[in-house]
Amino acid sequence: MKAMVFEGPGRPLRLMERSIPEYSPDQVLIRVSACGVCRTDLHVVDGDLTEPKLPLVLGHEIVGTVEAVGEHVEGLELGQRVGVPWLGGTCAECAYCKQEQENLCDQAVFTGYQIDGGYAEYTVADSHYAFPLASGLSDAEAAPLLCAGLIGYRALCMTGEAPKLGLYGFGAAAHIIAQVARHQGREVYAFTRQGDTEGQEFAHRLGAQWAGDSSMQPPTELDAAILFAPAGELVPAALAAARKGGVVVCAGIHMSQIPAFDYSLLWGERCVRSVANLTRRDGQEFLALAPQIPVRTQIQTFPLAEANQALECLRTGKIQGAGVLLPEIS
Ligand SMILES: [Zn+2]
Ligand SMILES: [Zn+2]
């Protein structure tokens, strides 16, 4: 099979011929039809995340078809369409796992980081961590739901019922979560890179009440904000935009350093928190909710062999919505 392989930070992914991976009794073999390109992949490529398996196949927004099932697999069938997310496995025994916080398990392994992911024609996944996917969206359109959608949804849940919601960084996750928030009757305030008028128009088309540069104050106080952009200076900016008691949720896996700020920004019971990974329950809830809304994704597709170009487009903000790799047209 063809795979785009990561060999170490600072080096471009390399197109390689590899043997189709072997599956264990608890795993399924999946023929990958689409794999989303996530900012986390950039953090791996750049060495911000320091513990990748090497060599590694990136990619944790995988949609594909079950081609073979291990002997212990229950609940997934040959030919079924499935999605594989970032959470690839947990210990199931620690205090976190037993208290519905498997996203915090110290033994967790992550797809496209400690285990090979979906920048390839085939992958294997632990059947307990793969989700059956409903019809409605094409494979490519569904791929961004698996991380941008799912971890975005977890972040949205952390804002409670906040009626006025700020979204900082209007990329793959925000364009999905804006639709969920609108569906729930919330007002969305979208913050983009400075001067990104296309991004701001995109946000308006998805129902945003207001869109502007991330350095701007919104026209009204926010009840909550989610930071999808990995820029630490947005934390004090979002706190300044939040009302007393408001929450600022940092949804990315990595962020540049947060600058020092006056305590007055945090005073008034404002709260800053992070969201780490996902639980399978998040996946089940969100993947059931998305078709009811229904969430529509805007995607820009790339052949598998152009994974490096796709990552570069993501880095420079040239993708509106989500980037998706298509192994079948490599
Ligand atoms: Zn555990
Ligand atoms: Zn991701």
Image (spheres, grey):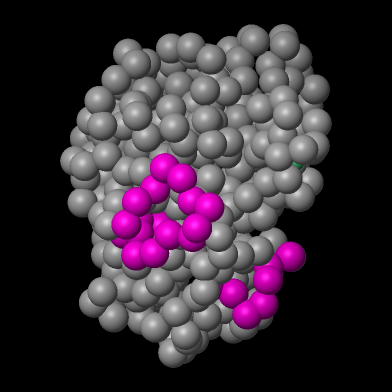
Q: Where is residue 28 in the image (x, y as percent from the top left)?
A: 46, 59
Figure check: 188 above or below 261: above
Looking at the picture, does residue 1 appear above or below residue 300? below
**Side (left or right) of 272 relative to 163:** right
The tally of labels here is: 0
Residue 228 is situated, as x and y percent measured from the top left of the image, at 52, 42
> Is residue 271 found inside the magenta-colored segment of the image?
no
**Magenta highlight: main SS:** loop
Where does residue 113 sit, x and y in percent of width and height? 62, 63
Q: Is residue 135 left or right of residue 213?
A: left
Report the magenta residues as a range: 51-78
Name the residue: 27% across, 39% down: 134
> Residue at the spot x=60%, y=30% of the render?
249
With respect to residue 311, does 153 lie above or below? above
- Quadrant of residue 176 in the image? top left
Residue at the far front: name it: 71
**For the point 66% across and 39% down, which residue is it?**
103
- Quadrant housing residue 100: top right
Is 166 placed left or right of 244 in the picture? left
Q: Can residue 160 be seen in this view?
A: yes
User: Residue 66: within the magenta?
Assistant: yes
Q: What x and y, as percent, mark residue 36?
A: 39, 58
As rendered, which of 2 and 272 lies closer to the eye? 2
User: On the rendered image, what quadrant is the C terminus found in?
Assistant: bottom left
Residue depicted at x 67% and y 77%: 54
Residue 148 visible in this rendered orientation of the protein: no
Q: In which quarter of the image is the N terminus?
A: bottom left
